[in-house]
Amino acid sequence: MVSTEKPRQYKVVGTRPIRPDGVDKVTGRAAYGADTKAEGMLFGAVLRSPHAHAIIKSIDTSKAEALPGVKAVVTARDFGAHAGGGVVDLGETRGQANYMQDNVLANHKVLYHGHAVAGVAATDQHIAEDALALIDVQYEVLPFVIDVREAMLDTAPILLDDLRTTVRAANSTLPTDKPTNIALHMSLEKGDLEKGMAEADVIVEREFETGMFHQGYIEPQNATAFWNRDGEITVWTSTQGAFSVRDAMAALCKVPVSKIKIVPMEIGGGFGGKLGVYLEPIAALLSRKTGHPVKLWMTREAVFQATGPTSATYMRVKMGAKRDGTFTGAYAYLAYEAGAFPGSPMGAGAQCAFAPYNIPNQTVEGFDVVINGPKTAAYRAPGAPASEFAVEAVVNELAEQLEIDPIELRLRNASKEGTPNTVGQPFPRIGAVEVMDAMKSHPHYASELTGEDVGRGVAVGFWFNGGMESSSSAAVNSDGTVSLILGSTDIGGSRASLAMQLAETLGLTMDDVKPQVVDTDSVGWTHVTGGSRTTFAGGWVAYELGMQIREQMRERAAQIWEVDADKVTYGDDGAIHGPDSKTMSFAELSGQLAATGGRIAVSASLTKNTQGPAYAGHIVDLKVDRDTGKVEILRYTAIQDVGTAIHPSYVEGQIQGGVAQGIGMALNEEYIYDDEGRLRNGSFLDYRMPVANDLPMIDTVLIEVPNPGHPYGVRGVGEVPIVPPMAAIQQAIYDAIGTRFYVTPISPRRILEETMPD
Amino acid sequence: MSNRVKTDRIVITAKINGDERTFLADERDSLLEALRERIGLTGAKEGCNNGNCGACAVLLNGVLVNSCCVMAAEIEGAELTTVEGLAGPEGLHPLQQAFLEEAALQCGICTPGFLMASKALLDENPHPTEHDARFWLAGNLCRCTGYDKIIRAVLKAADQMGSNGR
Amino acid sequence: MQPVKYKRATSVAEAVSLLQGGGEFARPLAGGTDVIVQARERRRDIDLFVDIKHIPELMAISHDANGVTIGAAVPLHLVYGDAKIVSQWPAVTEAAHVIGGTAIQGRATLGGNLCNSSPAADSIPAMMVLDAVAHIAGPNGKRDVSVREFCTAPGRNVLALGEFVVSISLPKPPAGSGGAWQRFIPRNEMDIAVVNAGVWVQLDGANVTDARFALGAVAPTPIMVPAAAEALIGKPLSDATIAAAGDAAKAAAKPIDDMRGSVKQRKHLAKVLTERTLRHAIERARGQA
């Protein structure tokens, strides 16, 4: 079911061609980061902290270095000078270079279980691993803190001696001159909260906690680096952002960006977790020391221990409404842990929390807090699933108390074009109402629920979507095809979605466009594949390239026909038309370019911040086994404003994948630490992501409210589908068994312990 | 834990994707390590290295196994099929074609394992139900797709293979 | 992977001699799904794998009038692929079908599941209620040990230096009896049991003439629950007697709190699973399932 606001006839956009990189990926030929092989390559391994918090008193690497086959051992000392406090832009997150360096290799303290302490390079993988046991590290173990609220207490162990609270909240009472774990206290205020609450007939206030969830990409982080004798560094890695890796490497290794080339390999999932650097600098230091290329990849356990989960949170949400359902006021308190270094996505969570609704009086107060856990990384709509879970759960309770259908209540308060968001800026054209209408009228919502202990829940979600900078170039080939050079790594079909937009612009087929992802020396600066921005921003660049080619093809035809250029048009059929019914196909003209003045090649670099925010609405039916606490998802419908679906199959796939991850968060995924602050479940066995028979088919409804800020109406689609599941499932469980849960995951254990008689 | 013993380099001969191959491996190499680093067949992927994700799945004497949980030394004299051996001279295997047509992959890292597991499924049960396919494939993790399009692709390939007798 | 040597045995005698020579750090290698990972993650000290899959009797399934003998290295997919085993000992094949994913079942074995001796091992409670016997070979010859007596502590068992399990026998179940096995896991596959339960009952009309109950993941080893049997034997089947068996199982369960489950949850599940599994076993005894 697809509804289109401004019906536009496209030839390529909206079709479902086979992706250009498809054959390589089904035949095992596609080269991912860990598949890298270089002449003389050494293999590396990383020693990690067994403690949650400890001072490194000494590191003796001599025994490891003496092991035959070991070529080098590196520690933080090998970085030389400490990186400064400069900021590296990672797209959806930012990092301070000195903290980033201390995260890559612990400097004088380890701050979490699994924190990297040393790296080894050897002639063989087994030898590198053997050498780890021969590195003697003496630790002085310190008290640790993992819970976000405990970390905020005055009595908590302090992680970073130099950290002081930055205050951006009007009435903050926090000191700004004392050691603390609270990196930031901020507030966003609109209207008059007290007045709003006073106007309310019904007020619901609840507390929530969400756990640390990992992105769970199947491919572990990896990097192969070669630091040549001339100082030129090449890194082959699976990353969402080759240029952000280059910037981070420059800051950490203290070399100019021009000395670094990042070769983005195929990437096995990221979801925000592969924006930053982990192994790349270690591989580079080992390569500098040995003169050989060095390949590193993480164990799955290290991925869980040391790469970015999302923030665990503690939240309070209070919302007031009039009898007729009008929301009068809303307050949210959001405490997000950031892991061992500042920089949780709390700010984004704060701006998303109430975004689906027009609420005149609202205050969101937020805290960014460091704890003895892995530095959090972006994860699909970073910050939003937690805060919107809390808000949507409260909205569902309000609907019950007001005796108004929960979708109807949302519709009565829905944000529309012009509604001021939490920071007071008006929304552009958005599809919140269209999504809610579609939820209400969907047969799923009207269907009868039958059986015992079954329940239904609904929730909506919002995500901004990012714009940012993208660059590409294109060249017309003599056979009428076009090469498209991309700086965005293809994490799930962007070669296809970008090639399709160029083909559409030129009136060609997707097969006529040959997309290629290239290294950082071969294309202009391009921001990360993240923030749901790639098909939006890269597509805009592809459109721009297409328009440039159209213009040049037109001029060339005019020259060949010896007529004025303004008498020649480029048709949407991909042919060039002149006076007197003169016409040439794209291919015909392409074949004549070399002989008539040279071939055509164009490039473009654009920064577009006209992204269209995305809204999603989900309906879930489930069954609870009261005797075991287990939840079975019976039916799931995900409705979303996708702007324009360039390749509908991959849009559906993004939604289905986001839903599956959201179901995992809601039901079973969590980080479990022991009494010593050690991660107990760093494996796919015990970090329980959904498996194939945990899920039903996930029905999608693509609502197309084109983004007026894009030539093809594209909105980002990848992130918002992870936002609604937690609240929808929480509500459905309540509907099934009459118990509301305010802590996720709502695991069988939690359900059972809450509901079983003693 | 000590390193009391020293492992040897060993010569292994096995039939891999139809061809007899002889290669040198370390005695403590897993089959996955040998495939990737000694033989250069990198289609099998390391996702977890402990049998919980299926990204390294291959067929050993026709039986689906996780190559991370097999010692390379064990395959002396055995027959092995990896994802690189799935397409024949006549073209892609129907499963590969169905995965492409159904958009059953996003990042693609789990795809080789899913293809091998799906092949093993259809070898054993040419007409699986959705339930059969989900149960059989539960040992293969995919984080991108929510499995929907993978299951559809497997069922589609089964239909096509059934109708054209492959 | 810690340094591990690999040797292939082609006879029981050769395996015994290799294992004895290898000492305390030698392990038989059957499916390898536990031991290879343990050696890789340096969780169990192993420096020699003795591959026992090339010993014919380790790979054989033989049915005779007394029951079936399953070689200790027979992979699970062949166990649940054997129609006779499925029809006569469904409790065992129910467990075999859900140990790991399909690719694990292509390698993992009943012998390995037994020798790994995890308190949560899925097949052990099923084998315990079916009176399974492990046939052991070692430097001092052969001996038989009831599967019920096999595990001694988490990861530990009765095997002495140089000994290994050659095969496991399941005696033929008498007419009018039925066995079943279930577990609880948070997902639908790929988890370690929070609790699992094996049940076997012998019926005479509406009366229970014999019964055996076992539970996993509620004690340092899988345990028998004789009190549950006592609550049932000699009594007519009813919701009350079934609940009494469940209560006995709950009382017998002495679990720990860990990342996979809590004491409260596990004790409750011991009852739930015992009752559910019992009902299934009763249906089988009546020939209804």
Image (cartoon, rainbow, N blue to C red):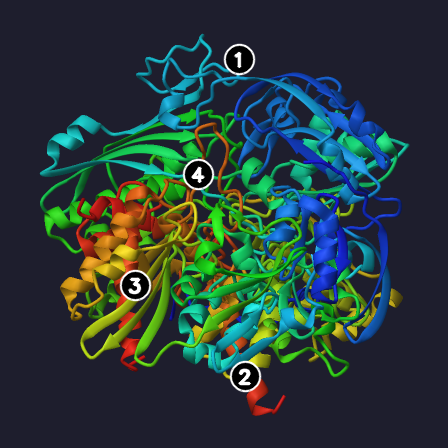
Residues at marks 4 and 1, CA–CA distance in whole angstroms: 27 Å
For mark 3, name the chain. A
**Numbered disc in front, either 1 or 2:** 2
**In this picture, residue A588 sits left or right of residue A607:** right
Which residue bears the numbered disc 4? A672
Label 3: state its secondary structure.
helix
- Amino acid bearing label 4: Ile
Query: Pointer 3: residues within 10 angstroms few (<14), some, or many (20+)?
Result: many
Closest to the observer, A709 or B52: B52
Disc 1: which residue? A161
Q: To which residue does mark 3 refer?
A: A438
Percent coordinates x, y for residue A200 in the rendering: 12, 36
Question: Which residue lies at the image location 49% right of the left edge and 26% below the top edge?
Answer: A372
Q: Mark 3 belongs to which amino acid? A: Ala
- Image position of A346 with respect to A436: above or below: above
Query: Residue under circle 2?
Result: B126
Picture coordinates of residue C207 (x, y %)? Answer: 19, 73
Q: Chain of mark 1?
A: A
